[in-house]
Image (spheres, grey):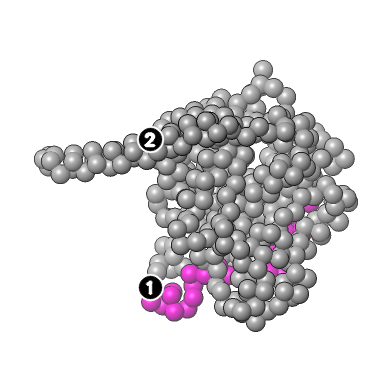
């Protein structure tokens, strides 16, 4: 019997602070009408000083784990898709692994821009299908507000912060992740990039003064790329699974821009009610946008048992990705009882104590060991 990866749990986290279009008019020369007409965005969430990519990823992971009804120690692989990690290294996935107490998990990050979550989903699903792993946590998390130039109205109006996560589990039942398509075109790398902070342009007085630590985007070129590649990737992933557009219940695209979504809908010839959008509430949250949208689609009863759902995105790289998912998780969902939430809280506190103890042991061992 073929084993497939099935979505068993899902969760999201968005910061409390809301930045509206009217708020932005106090920061740059723009207007609510200008932003709405060009992007469809009304507001976005902005990370607080205490929020980081890892902390938001951890909150989304908690919710997904509890929804799946598993123990953190059941997870044997963690993938975090992000282009705004807490550090170049260690990976954000390792920070999540330590915080949630996933003591048996491999952990690594994926940097594929806004396509990153679907990239991570595809990698995890294939490894589960190959029976190398049984349970995976896949997260998309971003703090784009930290790399946005708040003096550039062409980009600062677009982006927001947040995180979304899913638990994938091995299951021989029908459904799950049916197929995935991943692609890239590095010749378009300059269309959406962060110039400095890597080995080519390490941080210096020059890179800071030239504002090279803020993302740069050529909007028209990215738009043309997106409206071409998203419909193509959707058709390709369905064809790979032996399915047709008529069988699709819902498409959840990367939430970048309402005009991109509308153009993709037109190219596919689908009615608007089969495309999910929440870009008006969150803006573009990059790798977090698809998992956040998936969580909200489920919460809004837009996804049902046995539905065919397509996740499709594009991003910096340039990259694109799509996955066809036959939804197999029981719906409606049953939230954990109060005592179950309390038990998970105890587990997370134990994970924090365990982490501190391991750090202390390493410090003592280093202090009192003799050099060989």
Residue 371 falls left or right of residue 4:
left
Q: Is residue 149 above or below residue 271?
A: below
Q: Is 223 inside the magenta-drawn segment?
A: yes
Magenta-tinted stretch: 205-232
Q: Position of residue 282 (x, y in %)?
A: 65, 59
In space, the residues marked 1 and 2 are separated at their CA atoms by 41 Å
Quadrant position of residue 36: bottom right
Confirm whether residue 232 shows in the render. Answer: no
Residue occupying image coordinates x 77% and y 46% = 251
Q: Is 282 inside the magenta-drawn segment?
A: no
Residue occupying image coordinates x 66% and y 61% = 283
* Residue identified by numbered label 2: 350
Residue occupying image coordinates x 50% and y 61% = 48
Q: Secondary structure at mark 1?
A: loop
Q: Position of residue 99 (x, y in %)?
A: 42, 42
* Residue sticking out furthest to the bottom: 29
Quadrant position of residue 354: top left
Q: Nearer the viewer, residue 4 or 28?
A: 28
Crowding around mark 1 (Cα neighbors within 10 Å: few <14, some 14 to 19, many 20+) is: few
* Residue identified by numbered label 1: 204
For marks 1 and 2, the one nearer the N-term is 1
Q: Nearer the viewer, residue 184 or 204?
A: 204
Q: Main secondary structure of the magenta part?
A: helix
* Residue sticking out furthest to the top: 1
Quadrant holding the C terminus = top left
Q: Nearer the viewer, residue 111 or 190?
A: 111
Q: Nearer the viewer, residue 13 or 346?
A: 346
Circle 1 or circle 2, nearest the eye: 2
């Amino acid at each position: 019997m073929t084993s497939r990866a099935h979505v068993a749990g899902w969760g999201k986290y968005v910061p409390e602070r809301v930045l509206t279009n009217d708020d932005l008019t106090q920061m740059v020369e723009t207007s609510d009408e200008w932003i709405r007409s060009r992007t469809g965005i009304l507001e976005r969430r902005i990370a607080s000083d205490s929020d980081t990519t890892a902390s938001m990823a951890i909150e989304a992971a908690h919710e997904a784990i509890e929804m799946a009804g598993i123990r953190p120690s059941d997870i044997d692989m963690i993938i975090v898709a992000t282009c705004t990690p807490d550090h170049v290294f260690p990976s954000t996935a390792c920070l999540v692994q330590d915080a949630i107490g996933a003591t048996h998990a491999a952990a690594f990050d994926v940097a594929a821009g806004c396509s990153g979550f679907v990239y991570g989903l595809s990698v995890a699903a294939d490894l589960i299908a190959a029976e190398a792993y049984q349970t995976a946590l896949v997260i998309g998390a971003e703090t784009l507000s930290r790399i946005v130039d708040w003096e550039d109205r062409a980009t600062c109006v677009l982006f927001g912060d947040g995180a979304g996560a899913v638990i994938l589990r091995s299951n021989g039942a029908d459904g799950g992740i049916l197929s995935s398509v991943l692609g890239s075109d590095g010749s378009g790398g300059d269309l959406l990039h962060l110039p400095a902070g890597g080995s080519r342009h390490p941080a210096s007085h020059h890179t800071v003064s030239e504002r090279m630590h803020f993302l740069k985007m050529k909007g028209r070129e990215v738009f043309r790329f997106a409206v071409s590649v998203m419909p193509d990737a959707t058709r390709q992933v369905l064809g790979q699974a032996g399915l047709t557009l008529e069988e699709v219940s819902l498409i959840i695209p990367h939430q970048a821009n309402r005009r991109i979504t509308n153009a993709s809908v037109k190219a596919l010839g689908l009615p608007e009610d089969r495309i999910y959008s929440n870009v008006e509430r969150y803006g573009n949250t990059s790798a977090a946008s698809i998992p956040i949208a998936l969580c909200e689609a489920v919460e809004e009863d837009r996804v049902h048992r046995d539905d065919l759902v397509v996740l499709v995105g594009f991003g910096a790289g340039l990259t694109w990705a799509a996955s066809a998912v036959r939804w197999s998780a029981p719906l409606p969902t049953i939230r954990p009882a109060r005592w179950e939430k309390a038990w998970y809280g105890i587990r997370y506190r134990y994970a924090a104590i365990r982490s501190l103890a391991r750090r202390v042991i390493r410090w003592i061992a280093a202090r009192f060991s003799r050099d060989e």
